[in-house]
Image: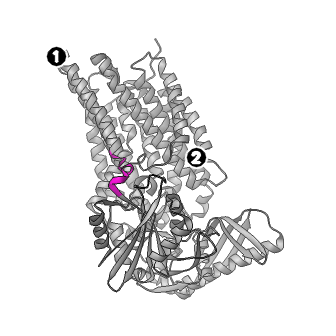
Amino acid sequence: MSKKNTVTVGQMYTLLFISRISLAVIYSVFVSEINSIWSFLMPLIISMALSILMMIPVNVFYSKCRKKSVCKISVEKFGQMGYTIPVLYAVYFLLSCIYAVKALEHFLDVILPDDINSKIVLSVLIIACIYASVKGIEALSRMSAIVLGFILLSGALTFIYLIQGFSSENILPFEYVTFNGVMDGTVFIISRMNTSAALNILIPSTKGKLWKSGIIWSVMVFMFMIFMLLLFRGAIGDYLDSRELSVYQATEGAGSLQRLNPFFIFVTMCSIFCNISVLLFALSESVKTIFRDGFGKIISVISGVILLFGMILIPDSGIIFNKYIWCVLTVMFTAVVPSVVYLFTKTPQPKISRKVVRTASMTIIISLVMIIFSGCNSTQLNQRLIVQGMGIDKNNDGYDITLIVLDTENEEKENAVKLMYTDGENVDEALFRIENQRGKKLLLSQCLFIMMNKEASKNYERTLSYFADLGEMQKTSNLMVTESSTKDTISTAVEKLGYQSEYINVLADSKAISQTEVHCSLIDYVSSLKNAKALLFPHIVIKDDISALSVDGSYLADKNGDYYSMTSDETLGTLIINQKVNDFTDTVGQADYKIRRIKSNIIPVWKDGFFDIDFDIEVYLDKNYDKEILKDIKNDIARKVNAGIEKTILQTGSDVFSIGKYIRSAYPEVYKNGNIKEFLKNAVTHTKIACRN
């Protein structure tokens, strides 16, 4: 008989603490559907209380005997029927591993350079996790102690940088705290507590005071996240609301910390490494209650191989990150299942117990199936009008709406789309009318863009506020403005691109032959409601000789309702500084050049009554160019950048580059006593362009 590995309760909770924090670090809109990081404050407090409540069944279950897990007891008590519990736990832990891997994959896709394949990195990580889980709980706890040191170091560095710009003005008031927002945030936080269910498997391998350590762990985890949230908010304000990876990008623009990006990525991956390793170990411990003890290592390897193939073969899907499904599963496997098993063990009649267990087991299995399929409502296409794009035209009588809808009735072509039209005195009435006419509810969670004509964009605040308040509306939807009617623009675009769902991405991203990305998202609009941040709406046109979209100027609208038209050069220069241009192709003389990526750094310095602002732009080109051509490229980019600076800063004083964030941090007294708009208009600017391969 093999010696059972044992660790202290403190070591186990350290491991779970790191695993819990890891998924919080890679928070993003993609996996949460939460609009603002600030909306997590109240949910964190509520979740802390719920976390302690969910630990009550665990502590009651293991209060007298900690030698056997819930899986072991269920097998011994109920025989073959008891096999259901360890199998369900194993499936849950495997799905949790897939969840963690997919979240990390998205994180790496955003953070890593284009020439690094995230799947290769993930494959190496999964192999390391398999090895760690095979080594057992003691090896995992020793590893977690090292990772904890890395986390504390990175947290200290982040604190040192952010505390310099901390301001209580960013904390209060509590803006846009709604009941639905609090509920959504709470559900999301509970959904990511997958390692809490592992308590039921890991506790028999521990020694020490379980209940006391559990409360301390829960309080520390949530207080740490609340503290960091207050720090981020106080130092940076609502700047993070529109960031793809809010927590990770909290130090974006910090000169010295930028050099430590590889270290922060390494720490994040180490945390996820702990998360996946402990889940694989819990999975093996669950399954080996059915077989012999030595079978656990084989199960770890098999599960890891399944995870590898799952990472490669399973596409990104909303179902994978559905917070409602994961919230129910977390509560079920953390608290409900051990409570049910505990109650059944107290039943004196074996026959009745077996019958009840059989019924309960089938109920659990059926519930899991129903939960999973309830998350797949998007596959029931014939019951919903799945909107992939929307055009809004304002006229004298009201609003005309053009919808790009997935054609679920077209059996000949998969992912075919069709156009639908509706109208009303306002947007709400128009959408309600088409639902009544068609007898189907609109599904807006797949809507990729909202396009407005010039008249509608003048009253964009009323229109966009409606969509911002819709719970199921995709907050990453792109916002656009077109010179002509959206009906004509969309119709022409779909005719040229094709009536296929995959082509809508071209229209949604407003990507031309030059592959210029010009848009802001609905979440950018939500963020702009809280400050004077300007919105950049692109103006797109269709050219007869191409089957795609091209950029031809834009409009700049600030919170005061002031409207500025911008030329193509001014638009592109503004987007270059904001690092919103990727895979952009342009021509200088007789030569074409292509920009693959851009990094920009804005440094404002106060000089006795005015700001001297340096714009350092690093442009990554696709290849080496001759010196003369390279000189022309630099001049061409500088011309565009200077045009954008001239229009947005020196003429209009619009803080589209978030310069106010820097000023507030570095020169708080100047920021409090001055007028940012006037400071920008009177600023002296310098542009430096550096080309890299």
**Residue 395 position by quadrant:** bottom left
Q: Position of residue 79 (x, y in %)?
A: 30, 16
Amino acid type at image mark 2: Phe
Q: Main SS of the magenta segment?
A: helix
Q: Secondary structure at mark 1?
A: loop
Look at mark 2 in the image and give the residue it sits on: 266
Amino acid type at image mark 1: Gln
Look at mark 1 in the image and give the residue it sits on: 349
Q: Secondary structure at mark 2?
A: helix
- Depth check, front residue: 555 or 437: 437
Bounds of the magenta segment: 374-384
Q: Is residue 462 above or below residue 143?
A: below
Residue 73 appearing in the image: no
Q: Are marks 2 and 1 in contact (CB under 8 Å)?
A: no
Residue depicted at 51% across the width and 38% down the height:
310
Whole-number angstrom distance, CA of label 2 to CA of label 1:
55 Å
Quarter of the C terminus within the rendering: bottom right
Residue 169 appearing in the image: yes
Q: Position of residue 215 (x, y in %)?
A: 31, 40
Q: Is residue 115 magenta?
A: no
Q: Viewed as shown, does residue 157 lie left or right of 394?
A: right
Residue depicted at 38% across the width and 51% down the height:
378
Q: Is residue 234 above or below residue 192?
A: below
- Depth check, front residue: 470 or 400: 400
Disc sitting over residue 641 in the figure: none
Residue depicted at 42% across the width and 24% down the height:
287
Q: Is residue 128 above or below residue 689?
A: above
Q: Is residue 295 above or below residue 230?
A: above
Q: Position of residue 34 (x, y in %)?
A: 38, 58
What crowding class fits label 2: few (fewer than 14 Cα within 10 Å), some (14-19), or many (20 or more)?
A: few
Q: Position of residue 295 (x, y in %)?
A: 48, 19
